[in-house]
Image (spheres, rainbow, N blue to C red):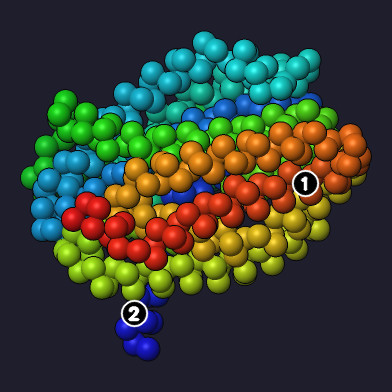
Amino acid sequence: MSNSRSTYARIAALALPTFGQLIAEPTFILIDTAVVGHIGDAALAGLSIGSTIILTTVGLCVFLAYGTTSQVARLIGANRRREGLEAGIDGMWLALIIGVVVSATLFAAARPLCAALGASGPVLDQAQRYLEAVVFGLPGMLLVYAANGIFRGLQKVRITLTAAIAGAIVNTVLELLFVIGFGWGITGSGAATLIAQWFMGVFLTVPAILWSRAEGASVRPRLAGILTSAGDGLPLFVRTLALRVCLVATVMLAARMGVTVLAAYQAVNASWNFVLNMLDAIGVAGQALVATEIGARRFREARAMTAAAGRAGAACGVMIGVGMAVAGFVAAPLFSPSADVQTLITIGMATQAVFLPLCGWMWALDGILIGAGDYRYLAGACCTTACAYLLALVGVNALDGAVLTTPAARMIALWVVLNVVFIGLRALFNALRAHGDAWITVRS
């Protein structure tokens, strides 16, 4: 019993502060959603399109955090501390390079990208304004991801919580000032988020560099190290690309179902992304702890940590699900003054809440398999899941108008198929892999 309590205590000690970093970008989008929703339905729908592009881009670069975390933790577990920190610095240089290139590309292609996701008319104008205003904050946000790989690997994650709280405060104050005080509309929302992203980037980059130099690690760009980080991250990029294609396709389907459904979907999706990061924090904690145990070749302890993290994820999913269902009834007016949109938000959040225990269990195993370096398996499993999910969306689209004849039915269908197929298949693949031994020795 004491060992079990110690394991859960170690998970909690990392998961709670890690949650702070993970919720940074979703929190910014959630704040944007709450403020922009009161501009009008077109603005809220436009935010759904623009924020989907931003979240997709940031999500595609999640390997900057996940890959760095597992690499740093394994090297530290093997008593190669300086090499681990240098690997983290390489990840930060890679993040900066990717951020600059991607930001410029998205800015140049803002309007056609928003149109490709289904935006048109006033919604397209609003989406373009938001995307162009926020896009150059991406390098700052990607630096946050990479720097946190170092902090997680070192198991020094309290600073990430401080950064997230400070970033959320900056974003909220500027959001209210720019959107309501100055009357800049959705452009002010994007500008506020951009400033908050760079604030967090600088806040975390400086101590990451100072701690690395104190350990004797080089902070200069090393081409070989940057290329190694990119190579290790490629399977994770493929994995995340497959998943993000699914989420973008869901937004596109919601856009086909009308402005009201899309506006409500944005509010539910922003809330879902927020609470998922509570669950992902458990996976990231397990990721760092299991990677350290694997680096030290303590395989039995790694397997015990995996089982504990899975149970913790499911249990937290139950508790968070109850909270999300309640929030759907009481918080809907915060996102929109429209009674129709509020009703759909309540329905969507209640539907999603039912599946959060499954999400929590799946996310915990997902993070641990990443920590073990089992990237290729995850890439293959997620590509298979994506194919099945896209076919399921085609089926939902075929039913729209015939079986799905009301906005409420459409909202329920979107969230049920996402959880049953998108989450359910990933949970199945992760469980099958964790049951065997191949994942635990893939990088040892």
Q: Name the residue under label 1.
A: 413
* Alpha carbon distance from label 1 to label 2: 42 Å
Looking at this view, name the residue that lies furthest to the top: 108
**Secondary structure category for the residue under label 2:** helix
| Residue 233 x %, y % | 32, 37
Going by the numbered disc 1, the residue's amino acid type is Ala
Left or right: 55 as drawn, with respect to 435: right
Q: How crowded is mark 2: few (under 14 residues within 10 Å), some or many (20 or more)?
A: few
| Residue 385 x %, y % | 54, 44
Can residue 277 be seen? no
Q: Which mark is residue 6?
A: 2
| Residue 313 x %, y % | 50, 66
| Residue at 38% in and 21% down | 100
Instruction: Please report whichever mark, 1 or 2, sits nearer to the chain's N-terminal start.
Output: 2
| Residue at 89% in and 34% down | 401
Indicate which label's residue lies in the foreground, 1 or 2.
1
